[in-house]
Image (tube, grey):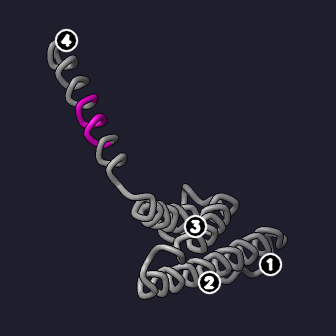
Amino acid sequence: MGEEQGVDLKAEEAEMMQRLQEEIQNLTVSDHLFYMVESLSALAVSRMGLTAETAERRDLDQARLAIDAFKALLEVMERTRPSEAITAHRSALSQLQLAYVAALDAGATTAAADDRPDGAARLP
C-alpha cells in the first residue's frame, strides 16, 4: 500500500469515527442503555467460551462481570422501556445466568478430570 493510500484510509477512518460519535450523541440515554445491554450480552456469551470459536477467550470472571452489569442496567431500563422489552431482556438475563452456571459446572468437571492420576479412566 502506498503512502497516499494509507493517508486516504486514515482520513476515511477518522470520518467514520466522527459520524459514529455524532450518531451516539443523537441517541437517547434509554436507547444507549439498550445497546449497552445487547453488547454486554454478547460479551458474556463470548467470555463463557461455550463454542469452539470462543473457547480461547474463556474468562468466567469477565462473563460474570458482564452479566452483573447487564442486570444492573436492566433495573435502570425498567423505568424507561416498554414492559414487553423488559420481559424479553429479563428472559435473556435468565438464559445468560443459566449458561454461566453451566460453564462453571463444565469448568469444575474439566478441573476434576485433570486432577485424576494418569491411569484413571476419563470420560469423553
How far apart marks 3 and 2 lie (CA) works out to 19 Å
| Residue drawn at 51 percent across, 86 percent down | 91
Would you name the residue on which mark 1 appears?
Answer: 120
How far apart marks 4 and 1 lie (CA) works out to 61 Å
Q: Nearer the viewer, mark 1 or mark 3?
A: 3
Comparing 122 with 43, the one in front is 43
**Residue at the top extreme?**
3
**Amino acid type, callout 2:** Leu
Query: Tag 2: Cα neighbours inside 10 Å, few (<14), some, or many (≥20)?
Result: few
Q: Secondary structure at mark 3?
A: helix
Q: Position of residue 71 (x, y in %)?
A: 61, 72
Mark sitting earlier along the chain (3/4): 4
**Amino acid type, callout 3:** Leu
| Residue drawn at 50 percent across, 68 percent down | 41
Q: Which mark is residue 3?
A: 4
Splitting the image into 4 quarters, where does residue 61 fall?
bottom right
Q: Nearer the viewer, mark 4 or mark 1?
A: 4
**Amino acid type, callout 1:** Ala
CB contact under 8 Å: marks 2 and 1: no
**Quadrant location of the N terminus in the rendered image:** top left
Would you name the residue on which mark 2 appears?
Answer: 98
Q: What's drawn in magenta, residue-wise?
A: 14-20
Mark sitting earlier along the chain (4/2): 4
How far apart marks 1 and 3 lie (CA) works out to 46 Å
Would you name the residue on which mark 3 appears?
Answer: 73
| Residue drawn at 57 percent across, 77 percent down | 96
Comparing 39 with 21, the one in front is 21
How far apart marks 4 and 2 lie (CA) works out to 51 Å
Splitting the image into 4 quarters, where does residue 57 fall?
bottom right
Q: Confirm whether the magenta stretch covers residue 45.
A: no
